[in-house]
Image: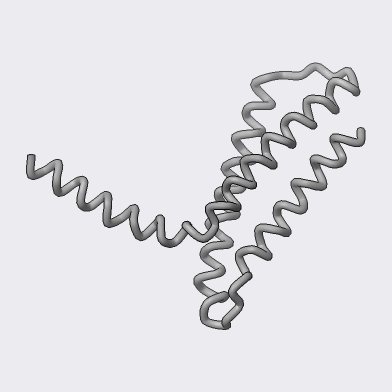
Amino acid sequence: MDERNIISGTAAVAFSGMLDYLYPLRWFALAGLIIVFADLRFGIEAARVRKEVIRRSRAIRRTFNKIVDYTCWILLASSLDHALGEPFNVPILSALIMLVVFGVEINSCFSNYFE
């Protein structure tokens, strides 16, 4: 019983720090998921218009790769915000980074939509 309490307490301490670190960017994570799934949908529609074979495994792999990429971008934006934004009093540094990254993905969605 004591071992379980020690493990639970250690996990709570470790994850609470990580949660405090990433909490300000929670809406960017949700927006990233929405944009990735929108890009998936528009990409499938564009492939149908081009009469290409739609391989489900490739679509799933590319979608998961984008989710991992956005997770990395969120971690980078949060790290840069803590390292540069707070000392130099730039409170929106992480938001600017994420908006640039999302702009690239939205451009991809529009190019697939208008194809």
Relative to 5, does residue 41 appear above or below in the rendering?
above
- The spot of residue 25 in percent (x, y) is 54, 57
The one of 85 and 72 positioned closer to us in this rendering:
85
Left or right of 1 in this view: 12: right
- The spot of residue 113 in percent (x, y) is 86, 35
The one of 94 and 76 positioned closer to us in this rendering:
94
Outermost residue, left side: 2
Outermost residue, bottom side: 88
Quarter of the image with the C terminus in it? top right
Relative to 87, does residue 40 appear above or below in the rendering?
above
Left or right of 110 in this view: 59: left
Left or right of 50 in this view: 65: left
- What colour scheme governs how the chains and residues are painted in the rendered image of this protein? one colour
Among the 4 quarters of the image, the one containing residue 49 = top right
Number of marks in picture: 0
Q: Residue at x 77, y 51 (%)?
A: 104
- The spot of residue 82 in percent (x, y) is 50, 71
Relative to 12, does residue 90 appear above or below in the rendering?
below
Q: Residue at x 44, y 61 (%)?
A: 21
Among the 4 quarters of the image, the one containing residue 109 = top right
- The spot of residue 3 in percent (x, y) is 11, 43
Outermost residue, front side: 27
Q: Residue at x 62, y 29 (%)?
A: 61
Quarter of the image with the N terminus in it? top left
Q: Residue at x 62, y 41 (%)?
A: 33
